Amino acid sequence: MGIDRRKFLTIAGLTAASVIGRKALGDSLSVAPESNLLPEENRLIGHRWAMVVDLRKCKEQHNCTKCIDACNAVHNIPQFDNPKDEVKWIWKEHFKEAFPNQEKEYILEGLLETPITVMCNHCDNPPCVRVCPTQATWKREDGIVMMDMHRCIGCRYCVAACPYGSRSFNWRDPRPFIKEINKDYPTRTRGVVEKCNFCAERLARGQMPACVEACEEKALIFGDLEDPDSEVRALLRENFAIRRKPNLGTNPEVYYIV
């Protein structure tokens, strides 16, 4: 066969999930057409996708939330008034909380007080994948850690296993709290976990992640770590970069230039 089992199941699962989702969740659920879920000829292909966040540029625009706003809009992320119910894919956290073990003596002046843009790290060694009893979360060959909300049983083992707080649980029905539903991406139900997926659905359409496109300062750079000519490789060659909690051995694929 020209396609391995994981790829087949991924494509088949996406197609089946969209059909099942429509039946199970009703006509009010906005589900992307199958044609939008299947890989297309012009899709972006990487061997190990990674994100580089240039904190020097973020620091200059520390009040900017365009990357967060774009992600929320594209992925139908609800906006709850109560922080306990918050669902977040990309958000900001203070440097000391994002990098608790990082030596800070020579960090760029002012950076310690600057909110840092954080997201799922798409770890090379993801603990969330190991603990999921239904394989609702899995790691693709290109390094993206995916989340199939239709297979999630809400046990929250993955939430407990993630050392970065990158997963959110829908304690409430999120749909009434979505400002404007994007019909190109499915909404979720109460009782499932969700997180950043590096915009896998956009990569399949040949588009960069929404947060990257929205960042006018070009502080977010997405690319293939296995490509020596990629922009992410060039940035990591030329700049000092750190990762979150490297001592845990999860090998995050999100790098921060400081």
Image: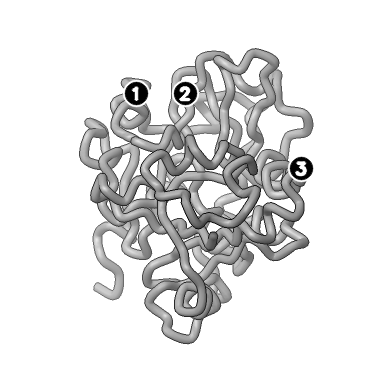
Q: Quadrant of residue 100?
A: top left
Separation (CA) of disc 2 from disc 3: 26 Å
What's under tag 3, amino acid-wise?
Asn
What's under tag 2, amino acid-wise?
Phe
Asked whether the residues under the numbered discs 3 and 1 touch, taking CB atoms below 8 Å apart as contact, a structural biologist would say: no
Q: Which residue is mark 2?
A: 169
For marks 2 and 3 on the same chain, the one whose residue lies earlier in the sequence: 3
**Total marks drawn?**
3
Separation (CA) of disc 3 from disc 1: 32 Å
Q: Vertically, is 158 above or below 199?
A: above
Asked whether the residues under the numbered discs 1 and 2 touch, taking CB atoms below 8 Å apart as contact, a structural biologist would say: yes
Q: Secondary structure at mark 3?
A: loop
Find residue 63 and name its label.
Answer: 3
Foreground of the two, 35 or 48: 48
In the displayed structure, does residue 12 sit left or right of residue 22? left
Residue 221 position within the rendered picture, expressed as x and y whole percent measured from the top left = 59, 66
